Image (tube, rainbow, N blue to C red):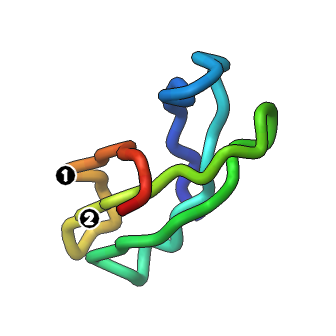
Amino acid sequence: MIEQFFDCPYCWQRISILLDPSEVELDTIEDCEVCCRPIRFKVHLNLEGQVLDFSVLPPH
């Protein structure tokens, strides 16, 4: 698992998400562990499991 840190777009707390390196593309919604608001994650990894793109967005 890969731990990716980011700032919540609502409460601005520094938190992290665990990414599965076997999934090269991920588009998911999870709640912030601090303020409980939904956050959409768009992630692209290369075949070696390195993060190429990581976006934190409001859910739509």
Q: Picture coordinates of residue 47 (x, y %)? A: 22, 75
Where, quadrant-wise, is the N terminus in this rendering? bottom right
Amino acid type at mark 2? Leu
The count of marks equals 2
* Image side of residue 30 versus residue 55, left or right: right
Residue found at x 48% / y 28%: 9
Secondary structure of the residue carrying numbered label 2: strand
Which residue is denoted by mark 1 in the rendering?
52
**The one of 24 and 27 positioned closer to us in this rendering:** 27
* Image side of residue 32 versus residue 10, left or right: right
* Image side of residue 56 versus residue 20, left or right: left
Amino acid type at mark 1? Leu
Q: Is residue 47 above or below residue 11?
A: below
Task: Name which quarter of the figure residue 60 lies in.
Answer: bottom left
The mark found on residue 2 in the picture is: none
Q: Picture coordinates of residue 39 (x, y %)? A: 52, 50
- Sequence-wise, the earlier of marks 1 and 2 is 2
Seen from this angle, which residue lies furthest top?
12
Q: Is residue 46 above or below residue 50?
A: below
- Is there CB contact under 8 Å for labels 1 and 2? yes
Task: Name which quarter of the figure residue 31 lies in.
Answer: bottom right
Q: Is residue 27 above or below residue 38?
A: below
The mark found on residue 45 in the picture is: 2
Q: Picture coordinates of residue 22 (x, y %)? A: 42, 82
* Image side of residue 36 versus residue 39, left or right: right
Q: Picture coordinates of residue 48 (x, y %)? A: 27, 68
Q: CA distance from mark 1 to mark 2?
A: 5 Å
Residue found at x 60% / y 53%: 38
Residue found at x 58% / y 17%: 12
Q: Is residue 57 above or below residue 60?
A: above
